[in-house]
Amino acid sequence: MEKYRPFRFPGDATVHGALPSGDFRDLNVITRTGIFKGFTSIIELRRKHTHSILKGQLGILLQGQATVTVTVTVTGHAEELETLSQYDAEWDRTMKPQRS
């Protein structure tokens, strides 16, 4: 497998794996079959281009650092800068958390 390459498989599949050496990180995207669909995309960040996180999306920085502009519209219009480091996450903050 390539580094950061998404690998899709059914959640009830028997899976075995071995690494030749070193640490690893595992990011699982699990959804309720027939109710939700989950998708992963690897996007390379570049200084001259911006990327937006849309409603229902979660962004995780896999390597390096990034500065994000956070706009919060639920509590009124406010913008702030945040610095993300490896494995930090950001999401669309206009979404209100819901409890089931």
Image: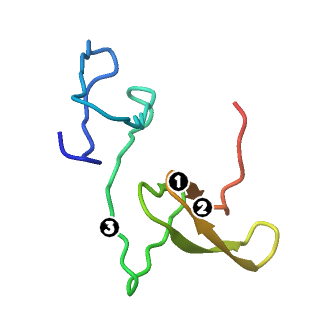
**Which residue was labeled with disc 2?**
92
Identity of the residue drawn at 76% across and 78% down: 78
The picture places residue 18, in percent across and down from the top left corner, at 24, 22
Q: Amino acid at mark 3?
A: Glu
Label 2 – label 3 distance at C-alpha: 19 Å
Q: Are marks 3 and 1 in contact (CB under 8 Å)?
A: no
**Which residue was labeled with disc 1?**
56
Q: Regarding mark 1 in the picture, which secondary structure is present there? A: loop
Identity of the residue drawn at 51% across and 64% down: 54
Residue at the limit of the structure toward the right, as seen here? 75
Quadrant of the image for the C terminus? top right
Crowd around label 2: few <14 · some 14–19 · many ≥20 (10 Å) = some
Q: Quadrant of residue 46?
A: bottom left
Q: Are marks 2 and 1 in contact (CB under 8 Å)?
A: yes
**Which residue was labeled with disc 3?**
44
Mark identifier at residue 40 = none
Q: Quadrant of residue 29?
A: top left
Identity of the residue drawn at 71% across and 41% down: 98
Crowd around label 3: few <14 · some 14–19 · many ≥20 (10 Å) = few
Label 3 – label 1 distance at C-alpha: 20 Å
- Closest to the observer, 64 or 58: 64
The picture places residue 80, in percent across and down from the top left corner, at 71, 77
Residue at the limit of the structure toward the front, as seen here? 21
The picture places residue 33, in percent across and down from the top left corner, at 39, 26
Q: Amino acid at mark 2?
A: Asp
Question: Earlier along the polypeptide chain: callout 2 or callout 3?
Answer: 3
